[in-house]
Amino acid sequence: LDVYVLPQPYFAQLILRGISVEQKSNVMALLRENGLEVDVTGITKWVEEADNWQHRCVGCCPGSPLCSRGSLDLVVGKKVLQYRLERLRARHGVRNPISVRIEGCEGGACVCAKLGEIGLIADSSGFYSIYLGGSSSGMRLAELYDSRVEPERLEVSLERAFGEYAASRSSESESFGDFCARIGVSHLRELQPSTKSSKSASKPRLSIRPEIMERLRAVAKARGMPATKLAAEIFDTYLDHASQRPQSQQIIAQSDGADTAKDPADT
């Protein structure tokens, strides 16, 4: 008997292989006795006819409030993202439920965002990478659609993709993920406008060794403040200290270097 467990945003699929036809009814009865849903048509109906899709089709990790690796608060952020995605659906007349998975870090182990029809993965600087083309069943890997997108500009990035889906899907029943996979995420990528604001485009970036970053996050968490704010305070303190170095010390240091350079010539 082969057993497979496929995690989903708010439920899991249990697949049993190697069961004979004679054993099937007994196995299904045993699963029902233990509280497991084995009616495949019921599961499909639950997904396809979800009235309140944002509560049933959006899987999300808690983010920074409950995870040291999370870079964003997704307990609150999830509600904001749901609202923005719902506005997109309403603008384009999309009634189909869409599987959305949101990760608060780039680890990808909690929600498996790259398996959703829309996958959002937050990086350490608070930007999102958007993946499209997965499936509601989690059986197809999504492709990168956009990167370093500010949370407030997610609608701008996805606007053309939703518009294309509403206008060009093969039928009313074609899911958003199936449409993206069929038409090609690379094609949708070419249609999108720039989602990088002038502020984020000119924002400087600084590389920090992983072990230093871990120490920075640990101290920031202990002090109850963002790691970026703590890093800014550290740099300010260091630069203030460096700028207060007596000018006379610098002159003496330069003078000593010049005297040393002349000694061989003098001899």
Image (cartoon, rainbow, N blue to C red):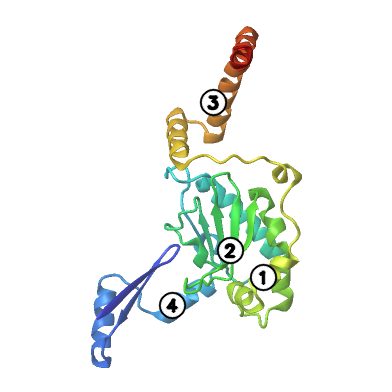
Visible residue check, residue 101: yes
Q: Look at the numbered discs 2 and 4 and tell me whether their residues touch, using CB distance below 8 Å.
A: no
Return the mark for residue 28: none
Q: Quadrant of residue 252?
A: top right
Looking at the rendered structure, the kind of residue marked 1 is Ser
**Secondary structure beneath disc 1?**
helix
Residue at the limit of the structure toward the top, as seen here: 248
Tag 4 and tag 3, C-beta contact below 8 Å: no
Q: CA distance from mark 1 to mark 4?
A: 35 Å
Looking at the rendered image, the disc whose residue lies closer to the viewer, 1 or 4, is 1
Percent coordinates x, y for residue 79 in the rendering: 57, 51
Q: Is residue 57 visible?
A: no
What residue is pinned by disc 4?
42
- What element does badge 4 sit on? helix
Number of the label disc, if any, that sits on residue 131: 2
Spatial CA span between label 2 and label 4: 28 Å
Upstream in the sequence, badge 1 or badge 3? 1
